[in-house]
Image (spheres, rainbow, N blue to C red):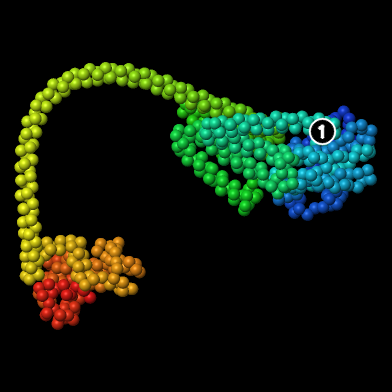
Amino acid sequence: MHKRFILFLFSGLLFLGLLFSKTVAEAQQTVAISDQVDQHIFNHAEIECLQDPQNKLTFEQVSSDAFRNRFVPSKTSTPQTLNNKSTYWYRIRIKHKSTAEKRFMLEFFDQTIDHVTAYLPQKDGSYTVHTLGDAYPFKERELHHKNFALYIDHENDLTQDYYFRFKSAQIADVIIVLRSVDWFISYALDEYFYFGVFYGMILVFSFYNLIMFIAMRQRQYLYYVLYNLSVGLFEMSSDGIAYQYLWGNSPAWNQNAYAFALYSTSIFALLFTRELLFVRAKAPNLNKLIIWIIGIRTALFFYAMFIDQDLLTYKFIEFIPLSVAFYTGIHIMLKGYKPARFFVLGYSFLFMGFILKFFIMLGYSWLNFGVVAYYSLSICFILEMVFLSFAIGDKVRILKTKKENAQRQMIRQMAEHGKLKDQLNHQLEAKVEERTKEVFHKSLIIEAKNSELQEANDLLKQQAEEIIRMNVLLEQDNQELQTNVEKVTRDRVMSADVDFEEFSRIYPDKDSCFLFLSELKWNDGYTCRKCKSNHFYPGHIPYSRRCSKCGYEESVTTNTVFQNTRIPINKAFYMIFLIYTTKGKISSHKLAEILNIRQSTCWTYGSKIKLLMEERKAALKKANKNGWSKLVLE
């Protein structure tokens, strides 16, 4: 019984000990102000967090006893606002020391936080409210520094809680640092000095390559300048320098400036890759992929900018263009292009910087080992910039070497051409001299022959004159004979049964038909159908006439039986002739057989001709042998 009591008492004491140790372990750790400590970064249990998904909690609520135990100690060294829709409350505990000689302040290290509301305790237990964030004009800050900084009142020996309300459109790092003012000034001067070196290097590299672009007119220099300036703009947007010096009164632009800088960095990096490594010629498929990536990234940027700005917070989407450029450099380096080795080396550092930042963002806090890790991407940018300059220099050196080799080759070829030219000149001189002698001897023979030819030419000239006289007489006889033949042929055609071949000798083509129609139509003179003017000049259509007064143009088939007909006009001529000579007794089938035209067409057009013959029956009886032409004009 006694042993059981001792065992029970020991177990109870062990349980209370464990409970007490757990309570002590879970209690928020207090940071004490001390002149011996110039800087302290709050982490883990020193920061307690309360998430407000509804965005409704007030300071009075979160600072009340009801919410005191709802704050949770940070599980990572650097808490983050992972949910952009929620409001986050943070609490730290500081033990003041009234005898401290140094003045202290709180600084927030992430410059991209949109809204920070700080509740600072006073001696009497009340709180003063300070509003910070990059969503407010820069001039409203208590301290004109790129980081958010606030003085604290430690003229008492109390342990007091500080509350901070965070609300940001993108993931923010909650880095709260307690610093002495002396340390802050020293650190700020050093930091701004290194910023000056960093951005100075970007400007120097950019200016140098801009001069190279102006001198050499190679687009790779221009893309490199724009890429460097984009990197500089992104870094300035990220660390708050741009908001302090460039657009301090434009908080709306400050919210999206980093996204524009990231977009331009990716685009100009890919364009620079294409130009530097001759991707179009050395890797056509990768060139197409780069063009597609540029197009998709541009479309995504404008969609995010004007439709869904939440997409702008996905900074690590730039990992895709970076990977494409990196892989392109590796691919072309393996194909033997030497400048690609510096390109790959530079992008290796940048790639490692992105990977480090990416894993820190995923929660691997052990990688966030200090200032080097925080500024790792900037350091990698500098290294990449240096190695890319080496790559450009290597490319220029290779091009220069190729140019010098080509010049030396040209000089050798010019020397060889000079030797060949001298040899050819000597050979030509010898042949010319030999040929000159031969020509001189032959010229004597030709001169003797010329005298003989002159005598023969005189005789031929006399004979030619006689032949010319005879040709003139023959030409006159031929013209008379041709005229007689045409008359006989025309009389035969107009008075007897002839076939289409014989008929076509009189009207062989469209021009002869148009000529006949023009003579028949305007035999009595021209009169404009619009304005009755008698003056005209040739129109645009063959044999048409255009009124010189009103400009009305009348074709040769207008107001004739051939107007708007689709039958070839010489066949239409023959069809009218056949119908006229047979007095309309020829059938449409016969016409189709003779003219090689569809029977329906012959029937339609023949019916029109027969109707005209019936209407002009009286006039046709009085007509001469060309009476069929009476059917032409309407």
**Residue 223, picture quadrant:** top right
Q: Judge from the rendering whether residue 9 lies leftward or rightward of residue 169; answer left or right.
A: right
Task: Using the rendered view, name the quadrant where residue 376 is placed.
Answer: top right
Q: Which residue is mark 1?
A: 184
The x, y position of residue 573, in whole percent, is 16, 68
Q: Looking at the image, which residue is at 63% across and 28% down?
A: 383
**Image check: 577 left or right of 85?**
left
Foreground residue among 509 and 45: 509
Residue 506 placed where, x, y %?
12, 63
Which residue lies at the image location 74% right of the left edge and 51% below the top edge? 53
- Amino acid on which the number 1 mark rests in the picture: Phe
Name the residue located 62 percent from the left edge and 49 percent from the top edge: 304
Q: Decide: is 30 above or below 518.
A: above
Q: Residues within 10 Å of mark 1 (few under 14, many from 20)?
A: some
Asked whether the viewer can see residue 567, the reply is no
Quadrant of residue 459 within the rendered picture: top left
Q: Is residue 365 left or right of residue 585?
A: right
Please state the horizontal and vertical placement of residue 222, each as a whole percent of the image: 56, 36
SS class, disc 1: helix
Q: Nearer the viewer, residue 599 or 44?
A: 599
x and y percentages locating residue 437 in the rendered image: 17, 19
